[in-house]
Amino acid sequence: MSRSIMQKMGKKAKTFLHFIIPSHLSEVEDICLASCHLLKEHNLEDNAFAVDLLLREFINNAILHGNGSDAAKQVCVDVRVGRKWIALSITDEGTGFHWRILKRCIPEPSADSGRGLAIGMLYADRMTFNSTGNRVVLFVEKKQSMNKEEMLHE
Amino acid sequence: MSETGRSKSAKGPPAKRKTGNVAEISREGDHLRISPGGKLTAIEAHDLQLALKQEIANGAREVVFDMKETITLDSTGIGLLVAASNSLRAVQGGIRLVSVKNDIFKLLRSMRLVERLRVSPEEEQVNHG
C-alpha cells in the first residue's frame, strides 16, 4: 500500500541502510536515528520502539563485548526493510561467543545486568547467530500503520 | 551535603543540577527527583550512575525518576535503575518510576520489574486503561 502511494508520488523509499562504525558508543545514536527515519518512510512507526531497542542492545554488545571497546575494530550494521520483515544484522570483529548455550530466561529482578539477550528474544520475532557468534541477525515482523493519505486512497 | 542537596530545614525551592548528559536532578532532604530526559541508555547511564552514587552516599534515600520525557530505555539504563534500587534497599530507602510511557512500561513489565522498581504508568494510560 505505502509503496504504491510512493510510486504515484514519483518517489521510491530506500529499503536498506549500511553502516560501518568504529567501536564507540557515541556512534549508536546516528544509526538509530537513521533507522527510525527509514521506518517512518515506510509507515512502520509501530516498529520503531522495538527496532531502536534491538539496535541499541546489539550494537552496544558488539562494541563492548565483541570488540572490547577497541576503537580500531569496527562494527558493521545493516538495516533492511523487506516485504514482511525488518532485518537487522550486526557484525563485530570479536571472537564471538557460545550462543548455543545461552540461558533463555529473564534475569532475576535484582540482577543489574544481563538483560540484553533477553530483550533480543522478546522483541525480535527471530534471532540467528553465525557459527562463531560474532554476527547476529534479528527479524522483526512489519506492523504497518496507515497514515491519513493512505486512508484516503484506501 | 552534596552540591545538589539541601537540609530539611532549608527554605526555598529544591536545588537543581544537570548531569553531563542532561538528566535533571533536584534534591530536598533525603528525597531526590531525577528527570532523565528523552533517553536513559548506555550513553547517559555512566554520568547518572556517578551522580546517584554520590547522592546516596550523601544521604538520599527516596529517589523518584520522573520518566515523562523518556522515550528510550535500554538494558544499561535498566541496569542503572536496578542498581540504584539495590543500593537504596540496603539503606532502607527505595526507588519509584513515575509517568512511564507505555512502551517502556511494557518493557519493564516483561523484565518483571514493575513491582521492584515501583513503576507507575503515565496518567493518560491510567485514565484510558
Image (spheres, rainbow, N blue to C red):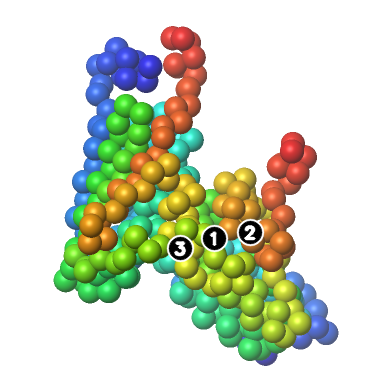
- Marks 1/3: CA–CA distance: 9 Å
Q: Is residue A151 above or below residue B2?
A: above
- Determine which residue is flagged by label 3: A103
User: Can you give x and y, in whole percent of width and height, for residue A58 in the image?
Assistant: 35, 58
Q: Is residue B64 left or right of residue A18?
A: right
Q: Chain of mark 2?
A: B
Number of other residues with Cα within 10 Å of mark 3, as a class: few under 14, some 14 to 19, many 20 or more? few
Q: Which residue is mark 1?
A: A106
- Percent from the top left, x then y, of residue A9? 29, 15
Say which mark, if any, is on residue A25.
none
State the SS at label 1: loop
Q: Are marks 2 and 1 in contact (CB under 8 Å)?
A: yes
Task: Identify the residue at horizontal 57%, vertical 46% (top origin).
Answer: B103
- Residue where numbered disc 2 is placed: B112
Label 3: chain letter: A
Q: Amino acid at mark 1?
A: Ile
x, y percentage for residue B70?
56, 54
Numbered disc in front, either 2 or 1: 1
User: Is the residue marked by circle 1 packed among few (<14), some (14-19), or many (20+) residues within 10 Å?
Assistant: some
Q: Are marks 2 and 3 on the same chain?
A: no
Question: Residue furthest toward the front?
Answer: A101
Q: Residue furthest top?
A: A153
- Among the 4 quarters of the image, the one containing residue A66: bottom left
Identify which residue is drawn at 71% across, 79% down: B89
- Residue B33 is left or right of residue A108, and the answer is right
